[in-house]
Amino acid sequence: MTNGAAAPQQIHPLKAGLEDVIVSTSEICFIDGHKGRLLYRGYDVDDLVEHSTFEEVVYLLWHGRLPSRKELDVHVKALASTANRRLPSKVLSMLKLFPKKTTPMEILRTGVSALSAFDPDSNDNSREATLRKALRLTAQMPTLVAAWERIRKGKAPVSPNPRLNLAGNFLYMLTGKKPTPLAAKTFDVALILHADHEFNASTFAARVTAGTLSDLHSAIVSGIGTLKGPLHGGANEQVMLMVEKIKDPAKAEAWIRKLLAERGRVMGFGHRVYRVADPRAKHLRRLASELGEQVGNTSYVKILDTIASVMSSEKHMFANVDLYSGAAYAAMGISTDQFTPIFALSRVTGWAAHVLEQHGNNRLIRPRSEYTGPTDAKYVPLSER
Ligand SMILES: CC(C)(COP(=O)(O)OP(=O)(O)OC[C@H]1O[C@@H](n2cnc3c(N)ncnc32)[C@H](O)[C@@H]1OP(=O)(O)O)[C@@H](O)C(=O)NCCC(=O)NCCS
Protein backbone atom coordinates (compact mmCIF):
# COMPACT_ATOMS: atom_id res chain seq x y z
CA MET A 1 0.00 0.00 0.00
CA THR A 2 1.55 3.27 -1.03
CA ASN A 3 -0.95 5.58 0.67
CA GLY A 4 -0.39 4.08 4.12
CA ALA A 5 -3.88 2.56 4.26
CA ALA A 6 -4.13 -0.84 5.92
CA ALA A 7 -4.39 -3.82 3.56
CA PRO A 8 -7.97 -5.14 3.45
CA GLN A 9 -8.36 -8.11 5.76
CA GLN A 10 -8.56 -11.36 3.85
CA ILE A 11 -11.75 -13.09 4.90
CA HIS A 12 -12.08 -16.69 3.77
CA PRO A 13 -15.31 -17.78 2.09
CA LEU A 14 -18.09 -18.92 4.32
CA LYS A 15 -18.42 -22.67 4.91
CA ALA A 16 -21.78 -23.41 6.49
CA GLY A 17 -21.28 -25.41 9.67
CA LEU A 18 -17.48 -25.08 9.21
CA GLU A 19 -17.67 -28.14 6.94
CA ASP A 20 -14.16 -29.40 6.08
CA VAL A 21 -12.57 -26.29 7.62
CA ILE A 22 -9.27 -27.10 9.33
CA VAL A 23 -9.17 -25.04 12.51
CA SER A 24 -6.09 -26.47 14.20
CA THR A 25 -3.50 -29.19 14.12
CA SER A 26 -3.93 -32.03 16.60
CA GLU A 27 -2.04 -35.21 17.49
CA ILE A 28 -4.93 -36.88 19.31
CA CYS A 29 -7.36 -38.37 16.83
CA PHE A 30 -7.49 -39.09 13.09
CA ILE A 31 -10.57 -39.92 11.04
CA ASP A 32 -10.32 -41.16 7.46
CA GLY A 33 -13.85 -40.45 6.34
CA HIS A 34 -13.41 -42.24 3.01
CA LYS A 35 -11.86 -45.44 4.32
CA GLY A 36 -13.89 -45.48 7.54
CA ARG A 37 -10.87 -45.53 9.85
CA LEU A 38 -10.58 -44.00 13.30
CA LEU A 39 -7.25 -43.72 15.09
CA TYR A 40 -6.48 -42.58 18.64
CA ARG A 41 -2.86 -41.38 18.81
CA GLY A 42 -2.13 -43.50 15.73
CA TYR A 43 -3.75 -46.71 17.05
CA ASP A 44 -6.69 -48.10 15.10
CA VAL A 45 -9.80 -48.16 17.26
CA ASP A 46 -10.49 -51.71 15.98
CA ASP A 47 -7.22 -52.85 17.59
CA LEU A 48 -7.97 -50.97 20.80
CA VAL A 49 -11.39 -52.63 21.02
CA GLU A 50 -9.78 -56.04 20.59
CA HIS A 51 -6.74 -55.66 22.83
CA SER A 52 -7.14 -52.72 25.17
CA THR A 53 -9.30 -51.45 28.03
CA PHE A 54 -10.98 -48.11 28.53
CA GLU A 55 -8.53 -47.22 31.30
CA GLU A 56 -5.55 -47.88 29.01
CA VAL A 57 -7.13 -45.84 26.21
CA VAL A 58 -7.56 -42.94 28.63
CA TYR A 59 -3.84 -43.11 29.45
CA LEU A 60 -3.07 -43.18 25.72
CA LEU A 61 -5.24 -40.14 25.01
CA TRP A 62 -3.81 -38.07 27.86
CA HIS A 63 -0.14 -39.04 27.61
CA GLY A 64 0.19 -39.72 23.88
CA ARG A 65 1.58 -43.25 24.28
CA LEU A 66 0.62 -46.63 25.70
CA PRO A 67 1.58 -47.07 29.36
CA SER A 68 4.08 -49.54 30.81
CA ARG A 69 2.59 -52.19 33.13
CA LYS A 70 3.60 -50.12 36.16
CA GLU A 71 2.19 -46.87 34.74
CA LEU A 72 -1.08 -48.61 33.86
CA ASP A 73 -1.41 -50.12 37.34
CA VAL A 74 -0.96 -46.72 38.98
CA HIS A 75 -3.43 -45.11 36.55
CA VAL A 76 -6.08 -47.85 36.97
CA LYS A 77 -5.76 -47.65 40.75
CA ALA A 78 -6.15 -43.87 40.76
CA LEU A 79 -9.25 -44.02 38.52
CA ALA A 80 -10.78 -46.69 40.78
CA SER A 81 -9.93 -45.20 44.17
CA THR A 82 -12.86 -44.28 46.35
CA ALA A 83 -11.16 -40.96 47.11
CA ASN A 84 -11.37 -40.03 43.42
CA ARG A 85 -14.74 -41.64 42.66
CA ARG A 86 -16.65 -40.40 45.70
CA LEU A 87 -18.84 -37.29 45.36
CA PRO A 88 -18.46 -34.56 47.98
CA SER A 89 -21.35 -35.02 50.42
CA LYS A 90 -22.61 -31.51 49.62
CA VAL A 91 -22.90 -32.41 45.92
CA LEU A 92 -24.90 -35.52 46.88
CA SER A 93 -27.13 -33.37 49.09
CA MET A 94 -27.54 -30.92 46.21
CA LEU A 95 -28.75 -33.73 43.92
CA LYS A 96 -31.54 -34.49 46.37
CA LEU A 97 -32.87 -30.93 45.92
CA PHE A 98 -33.62 -31.22 42.20
CA PRO A 99 -37.10 -32.00 40.86
CA LYS A 100 -37.25 -35.72 40.00
CA LYS A 101 -38.14 -34.83 36.40
CA THR A 102 -34.71 -33.22 35.88
CA THR A 103 -33.03 -35.06 33.01
CA PRO A 104 -29.75 -36.92 33.62
CA MET A 105 -28.03 -34.64 31.10
CA GLU A 106 -29.13 -31.53 33.05
CA ILE A 107 -27.86 -33.13 36.23
CA LEU A 108 -24.54 -33.98 34.62
CA ARG A 109 -24.07 -30.45 33.27
CA THR A 110 -24.91 -28.90 36.65
CA GLY A 111 -23.09 -31.53 38.69
CA VAL A 112 -19.79 -31.15 36.83
CA SER A 113 -19.99 -27.41 37.35
CA ALA A 114 -20.62 -27.97 41.06
CA LEU A 115 -17.73 -30.43 41.34
CA SER A 116 -15.41 -27.65 40.24
CA ALA A 117 -16.18 -25.77 43.45
CA PHE A 118 -14.89 -28.72 45.51
CA ASP A 119 -11.84 -29.53 43.39
CA PRO A 120 -8.55 -28.69 45.16
CA ASP A 121 -6.97 -27.72 41.81
CA SER A 122 -9.88 -25.68 40.47
CA ASN A 123 -7.81 -22.51 39.99
CA ASP A 124 -4.67 -24.21 38.70
CA ASN A 125 -4.47 -24.58 34.91
CA SER A 126 -1.01 -26.16 34.82
CA ARG A 127 -0.71 -29.42 32.84
CA GLU A 128 -0.16 -31.41 36.06
CA ALA A 129 -3.22 -29.91 37.77
CA THR A 130 -5.37 -30.35 34.64
CA LEU A 131 -4.36 -34.02 34.50
CA ARG A 132 -5.30 -34.44 38.17
CA LYS A 133 -8.66 -32.74 37.55
CA ALA A 134 -9.26 -34.85 34.43
CA LEU A 135 -8.63 -38.01 36.43
CA ARG A 136 -10.96 -36.95 39.24
CA LEU A 137 -13.74 -35.90 36.85
CA THR A 138 -13.45 -39.15 34.86
CA ALA A 139 -13.73 -41.05 38.16
CA GLN A 140 -16.53 -38.86 39.58
CA MET A 141 -18.84 -38.53 36.57
CA PRO A 142 -20.06 -42.17 36.66
CA THR A 143 -20.83 -41.74 40.37
CA LEU A 144 -22.79 -38.58 39.61
CA VAL A 145 -24.81 -40.15 36.80
CA ALA A 146 -25.52 -43.34 38.77
CA ALA A 147 -26.42 -41.41 41.94
CA TRP A 148 -29.02 -39.36 40.08
CA GLU A 149 -30.55 -42.51 38.56
CA ARG A 150 -30.98 -43.90 42.08
CA ILE A 151 -32.17 -40.64 43.66
CA ARG A 152 -34.80 -39.94 41.00
CA LYS A 153 -36.18 -43.44 41.56
CA GLY A 154 -36.35 -42.81 45.32
CA LYS A 155 -33.43 -45.18 46.06
CA ALA A 156 -30.22 -44.59 48.02
CA PRO A 157 -27.08 -44.04 45.91
CA VAL A 158 -24.67 -47.00 45.82
CA SER A 159 -21.07 -46.30 46.91
CA PRO A 160 -18.39 -46.98 44.29
CA ASN A 161 -16.57 -50.31 44.43
CA PRO A 162 -12.79 -49.81 44.00
CA ARG A 163 -12.34 -53.45 42.92
CA LEU A 164 -14.35 -52.87 39.73
CA ASN A 165 -13.12 -51.09 36.62
CA LEU A 166 -14.89 -47.94 35.49
CA ALA A 167 -17.36 -49.80 33.28
CA GLY A 168 -18.23 -52.49 35.83
CA ASN A 169 -18.42 -50.02 38.69
CA PHE A 170 -20.83 -47.74 36.81
CA LEU A 171 -23.22 -50.60 36.09
CA TYR A 172 -22.85 -51.74 39.71
CA MET A 173 -23.67 -48.27 41.06
CA LEU A 174 -26.77 -48.08 38.83
CA THR A 175 -28.28 -51.34 40.05
CA GLY A 176 -26.44 -52.34 43.24
CA LYS A 177 -25.60 -55.67 41.53
CA LYS A 178 -22.36 -56.76 39.91
CA PRO A 179 -22.91 -56.77 36.11
CA THR A 180 -22.55 -59.92 34.01
CA PRO A 181 -19.13 -60.28 32.34
CA LEU A 182 -20.74 -59.64 28.92
CA ALA A 183 -22.46 -56.45 30.13
CA ALA A 184 -19.24 -55.16 31.74
CA LYS A 185 -17.19 -55.99 28.62
CA THR A 186 -19.79 -54.42 26.33
CA PHE A 187 -19.83 -51.27 28.39
CA ASP A 188 -16.03 -51.10 28.43
CA VAL A 189 -15.93 -51.39 24.63
CA ALA A 190 -18.63 -48.73 24.28
CA LEU A 191 -16.50 -46.42 26.44
CA ILE A 192 -13.44 -47.08 24.23
CA LEU A 193 -15.46 -46.30 21.10
CA HIS A 194 -16.84 -43.02 22.42
CA ALA A 195 -13.64 -41.65 23.95
CA ASP A 196 -12.62 -39.24 21.20
CA HIS A 197 -13.58 -38.16 17.71
CA GLU A 198 -11.39 -35.35 16.46
CA PHE A 199 -13.01 -31.88 16.20
CA ASN A 200 -16.64 -32.90 16.68
CA ALA A 201 -19.01 -30.18 17.93
CA SER A 202 -18.59 -30.81 21.66
CA THR A 203 -14.81 -31.17 21.48
CA PHE A 204 -14.61 -27.97 19.48
CA ALA A 205 -16.78 -26.24 22.10
CA ALA A 206 -14.49 -27.54 24.85
CA ARG A 207 -11.44 -26.29 22.95
CA VAL A 208 -12.99 -22.87 22.36
CA THR A 209 -13.55 -22.60 26.10
CA ALA A 210 -10.02 -23.80 26.89
CA GLY A 211 -8.71 -21.35 24.30
CA THR A 212 -9.75 -18.42 26.48
CA LEU A 213 -7.47 -20.00 29.12
CA SER A 214 -10.51 -21.06 31.07
CA ASP A 215 -10.25 -24.19 33.22
CA LEU A 216 -10.96 -27.88 32.59
CA HIS A 217 -14.34 -27.99 34.39
CA SER A 218 -15.60 -25.03 32.35
CA ALA A 219 -14.48 -26.67 29.11
CA ILE A 220 -16.18 -29.94 30.09
CA VAL A 221 -19.42 -28.12 30.91
CA SER A 222 -19.27 -26.52 27.43
CA GLY A 223 -18.72 -30.00 25.98
CA ILE A 224 -21.65 -31.51 27.89
CA GLY A 225 -24.01 -28.72 26.82
CA THR A 226 -22.99 -29.23 23.20
CA LEU A 227 -23.15 -33.02 23.30
CA LYS A 228 -26.74 -32.85 24.56
CA GLY A 229 -28.27 -31.81 21.21
CA PRO A 230 -30.02 -34.44 19.04
CA LEU A 231 -27.73 -33.77 16.07
CA HIS A 232 -24.76 -34.83 18.23
CA GLY A 233 -24.70 -37.10 21.31
CA GLY A 234 -28.42 -36.75 21.91
CA ALA A 235 -29.02 -38.84 18.77
CA ASN A 236 -28.58 -42.13 20.68
CA GLU A 237 -31.66 -41.34 22.79
CA GLN A 238 -33.65 -40.32 19.70
CA VAL A 239 -32.80 -43.65 18.05
CA MET A 240 -34.26 -45.58 20.98
CA LEU A 241 -37.40 -43.40 21.01
CA MET A 242 -37.81 -44.25 17.30
CA VAL A 243 -37.32 -47.98 17.98
CA GLU A 244 -39.89 -47.84 20.77
CA LYS A 245 -42.36 -46.18 18.41
CA ILE A 246 -41.79 -48.86 15.73
CA LYS A 247 -41.97 -51.70 18.33
CA ASP A 248 -42.42 -54.56 15.83
CA PRO A 249 -39.54 -55.52 13.46
CA ALA A 250 -42.12 -56.42 10.82
CA LYS A 251 -43.29 -52.78 10.75
CA ALA A 252 -39.82 -51.21 10.58
CA GLU A 253 -39.45 -51.06 6.79
CA ALA A 254 -42.79 -49.36 6.14
CA TRP A 255 -42.20 -46.98 9.04
CA ILE A 256 -38.82 -45.82 7.79
CA ARG A 257 -39.94 -45.54 4.16
CA LYS A 258 -42.78 -43.29 5.29
CA LEU A 259 -40.38 -41.12 7.29
CA LEU A 260 -38.09 -40.79 4.26
CA ALA A 261 -41.03 -39.96 2.00
CA GLU A 262 -41.88 -37.15 4.41
CA ARG A 263 -38.24 -36.00 4.17
CA GLY A 264 -37.71 -36.78 7.85
CA ARG A 265 -34.27 -37.07 9.44
CA VAL A 266 -33.40 -40.57 10.61
CA MET A 267 -31.40 -40.48 13.80
CA GLY A 268 -28.28 -42.61 13.98
CA PHE A 269 -27.42 -42.04 10.30
CA GLY A 270 -25.28 -39.59 8.41
CA HIS A 271 -22.07 -37.93 9.41
CA ARG A 272 -20.16 -34.80 8.61
CA VAL A 273 -16.90 -36.68 8.06
CA TYR A 274 -17.61 -40.34 7.21
CA ARG A 275 -18.61 -41.07 3.62
CA VAL A 276 -18.68 -44.79 4.40
CA ALA A 277 -19.81 -46.73 7.47
CA ASP A 278 -18.71 -45.34 10.83
CA PRO A 279 -16.10 -47.90 12.02
CA ARG A 280 -17.56 -47.82 15.55
CA ALA A 281 -21.03 -48.95 14.49
CA LYS A 282 -20.09 -52.57 13.64
CA HIS A 283 -18.68 -53.17 17.15
CA LEU A 284 -21.75 -51.68 18.80
CA ARG A 285 -24.05 -53.71 16.56
CA ARG A 286 -22.26 -56.95 17.47
CA LEU A 287 -22.38 -56.16 21.19
CA ALA A 288 -26.02 -55.06 21.10
CA SER A 289 -26.88 -58.26 19.27
CA GLU A 290 -24.98 -60.50 21.74
CA LEU A 291 -26.48 -58.75 24.75
CA GLY A 292 -29.96 -58.77 23.20
CA GLU A 293 -29.72 -62.52 22.74
CA GLN A 294 -28.53 -62.97 26.32
CA VAL A 295 -31.49 -61.07 27.74
CA GLY A 296 -34.01 -62.43 25.21
CA ASN A 297 -34.66 -59.20 23.31
CA THR A 298 -33.58 -59.41 19.69
CA SER A 299 -36.23 -57.07 18.31
CA TYR A 300 -34.26 -53.83 18.81
CA VAL A 301 -31.36 -54.99 16.66
CA LYS A 302 -33.76 -56.46 14.06
CA ILE A 303 -35.54 -53.10 13.79
CA LEU A 304 -32.24 -51.22 13.51
CA ASP A 305 -30.90 -53.65 10.89
CA THR A 306 -34.01 -53.11 8.76
CA ILE A 307 -33.66 -49.34 9.04
CA ALA A 308 -29.95 -49.60 8.18
CA SER A 309 -30.69 -51.63 5.08
CA VAL A 310 -33.33 -49.14 3.82
CA MET A 311 -31.04 -46.17 4.56
CA SER A 312 -28.18 -47.79 2.67
CA SER A 313 -30.22 -48.62 -0.42
CA GLU A 314 -32.37 -45.48 -0.51
CA LYS A 315 -30.02 -42.77 0.75
CA HIS A 316 -26.55 -44.35 0.59
CA MET A 317 -26.30 -43.42 4.27
CA PHE A 318 -24.81 -45.62 6.95
CA ALA A 319 -25.10 -46.22 10.67
CA ASN A 320 -23.12 -43.87 12.86
CA VAL A 321 -21.98 -44.49 16.44
CA ASP A 322 -25.42 -43.62 17.81
CA LEU A 323 -27.47 -46.24 15.97
CA TYR A 324 -26.71 -49.42 17.92
CA SER A 325 -25.26 -48.11 21.22
CA GLY A 326 -28.68 -47.53 22.75
CA ALA A 327 -29.84 -51.08 21.92
CA ALA A 328 -26.85 -52.38 23.92
CA TYR A 329 -27.59 -50.08 26.86
CA ALA A 330 -31.30 -50.92 26.75
CA ALA A 331 -30.40 -54.64 26.92
CA MET A 332 -28.58 -53.82 30.16
CA GLY A 333 -31.77 -52.25 31.51
CA ILE A 334 -30.46 -48.67 31.29
CA SER A 335 -33.02 -45.86 30.91
CA THR A 336 -33.07 -44.15 27.51
CA ASP A 337 -32.35 -40.68 28.89
CA GLN A 338 -29.10 -42.03 30.39
CA PHE A 339 -27.64 -42.82 26.96
CA THR A 340 -26.22 -39.37 26.28
CA PRO A 341 -24.75 -39.00 29.80
CA ILE A 342 -23.07 -42.39 29.19
CA PHE A 343 -21.55 -40.96 26.00
CA ALA A 344 -20.21 -38.09 28.14
CA LEU A 345 -18.70 -40.47 30.74
CA SER A 346 -16.38 -41.62 28.01
CA ARG A 347 -15.98 -38.44 25.94
CA VAL A 348 -14.86 -36.47 29.00
CA THR A 349 -11.51 -38.18 28.51
CA GLY A 350 -11.21 -36.98 24.91
CA TRP A 351 -12.34 -33.48 25.88
CA ALA A 352 -9.65 -33.45 28.58
CA ALA A 353 -6.98 -34.55 26.09
CA HIS A 354 -8.03 -31.69 23.82
CA VAL A 355 -7.99 -29.17 26.68
CA LEU A 356 -4.43 -30.27 27.53
CA GLU A 357 -3.42 -29.93 23.88
CA GLN A 358 -5.12 -26.54 23.53
CA HIS A 359 -3.51 -25.19 26.70
CA GLY A 360 -0.14 -26.59 25.56
CA ASN A 361 -0.08 -24.43 22.43
CA ASN A 362 -2.81 -21.88 22.87
CA ARG A 363 -4.17 -19.17 20.68
CA LEU A 364 -7.60 -17.67 21.33
CA ILE A 365 -10.17 -19.21 18.95
CA ARG A 366 -12.08 -16.31 17.53
CA PRO A 367 -13.48 -16.68 14.01
CA ARG A 368 -15.44 -14.08 12.03
CA SER A 369 -18.96 -13.92 10.70
CA GLU A 370 -20.02 -12.48 7.39
CA TYR A 371 -22.25 -9.61 8.40
CA THR A 372 -25.54 -9.56 6.49
CA GLY A 373 -27.48 -7.05 8.59
CA PRO A 374 -28.09 -3.34 7.93
CA THR A 375 -25.25 -0.80 8.14
CA ASP A 376 -27.11 2.52 8.11
CA ALA A 377 -29.80 2.17 10.79
CA LYS A 378 -30.74 5.55 12.25
CA TYR A 379 -31.58 5.61 15.94
CA VAL A 380 -35.21 6.63 16.54
CA PRO A 381 -35.97 7.93 20.03
CA LEU A 382 -38.30 5.68 22.03
CA SER A 383 -41.02 8.36 22.11
CA GLU A 384 -41.15 8.42 18.27
CA ARG A 385 -41.42 4.64 17.73
C1 LIG B 1 -24.83 -35.88 11.62
C2 LIG B 1 -25.51 -34.80 10.81
C3 LIG B 1 -25.96 -33.68 11.75
C4 LIG B 1 -24.52 -34.25 9.79
O1 LIG B 1 -25.17 -33.28 9.12
P1 LIG B 1 -24.56 -32.36 7.97
O2 LIG B 1 -23.22 -32.79 7.57
O3 LIG B 1 -24.75 -30.95 8.41
O4 LIG B 1 -25.53 -32.68 6.78
P2 LIG B 1 -26.87 -31.90 6.44
O5 LIG B 1 -27.73 -31.75 7.65
O6 LIG B 1 -26.48 -30.63 5.72
O7 LIG B 1 -27.53 -32.91 5.45
C5 LIG B 1 -27.15 -33.07 4.08
C6 LIG B 1 -28.26 -33.81 3.35
O8 LIG B 1 -28.37 -35.15 3.84
C7 LIG B 1 -29.64 -35.36 4.45
N1 LIG B 1 -29.42 -36.06 5.71
C8 LIG B 1 -28.36 -35.92 6.52
N2 LIG B 1 -28.51 -36.74 7.59
C9 LIG B 1 -29.69 -37.38 7.41
C10 LIG B 1 -30.38 -38.33 8.17
N3 LIG B 1 -29.89 -38.77 9.32
N4 LIG B 1 -31.57 -38.77 7.73
C11 LIG B 1 -32.07 -38.32 6.56
N5 LIG B 1 -31.45 -37.41 5.78
C12 LIG B 1 -30.27 -36.96 6.22
C13 LIG B 1 -30.21 -33.97 4.72
O9 LIG B 1 -31.61 -33.95 4.75
C14 LIG B 1 -29.64 -33.19 3.56
O10 LIG B 1 -30.40 -33.48 2.43
P3 LIG B 1 -30.80 -32.32 1.39
O11 LIG B 1 -29.47 -31.80 0.87
O12 LIG B 1 -31.64 -33.02 0.38
O13 LIG B 1 -31.54 -31.30 2.19
C15 LIG B 1 -26.73 -35.37 10.07
O14 LIG B 1 -26.33 -36.44 9.26
C16 LIG B 1 -27.84 -35.81 11.02
O15 LIG B 1 -28.68 -34.97 11.40
N6 LIG B 1 -27.88 -37.10 11.41
C17 LIG B 1 -28.86 -37.56 12.38
C18 LIG B 1 -28.43 -37.22 13.78
C19 LIG B 1 -27.31 -38.10 14.24
O16 LIG B 1 -27.36 -39.31 14.11
N7 LIG B 1 -26.29 -37.46 14.82
C20 LIG B 1 -25.14 -38.17 15.36
C21 LIG B 1 -23.95 -37.94 14.52
S1 LIG B 1 -22.62 -38.98 15.02
Image (cartoon, rainbow, N blue to C red):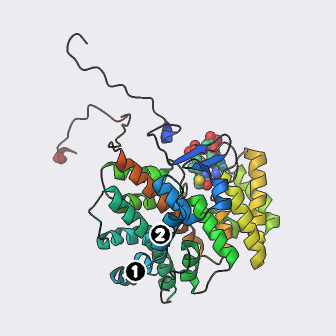
Q: Amino acid at mark 2?
A: Val
Query: Dot 1 corresponds to which residue?
Result: 95
Tag 2 secondary structure: helix
The quarter of the picture where the C terminus appears is: top left
Locate residue 311, reporting x and y percent.
74, 50
Tag 1 secondary structure: helix
Circle nearer the N terminus (2, 1): 2
The quarter of the picture where the N terminus appears is: top left
- How many numbered discs? 2
Let me know if residue 94 appears in the view: yes
Q: Residue at x 20, y 11 (%)?
A: 3
Q: Is mark 1 within 8 Å of ligand 1?
A: no
Q: Amino acid at mark 1?
A: Leu
Q: Residue at x 66, y 42 (%)?
A: 275
Locate residue 208, reporting x and y percent.
38, 49
Nearer to us in this view, 197 or 301: 197
Residue 16 tag number: none
Query: Dot 2 corresponds to which residue?
Result: 74
Name the residue furthest right.
250
Q: Answer yes or no: do the residues labelled 2 and 1 have beta carbons within 8 Å?
A: no
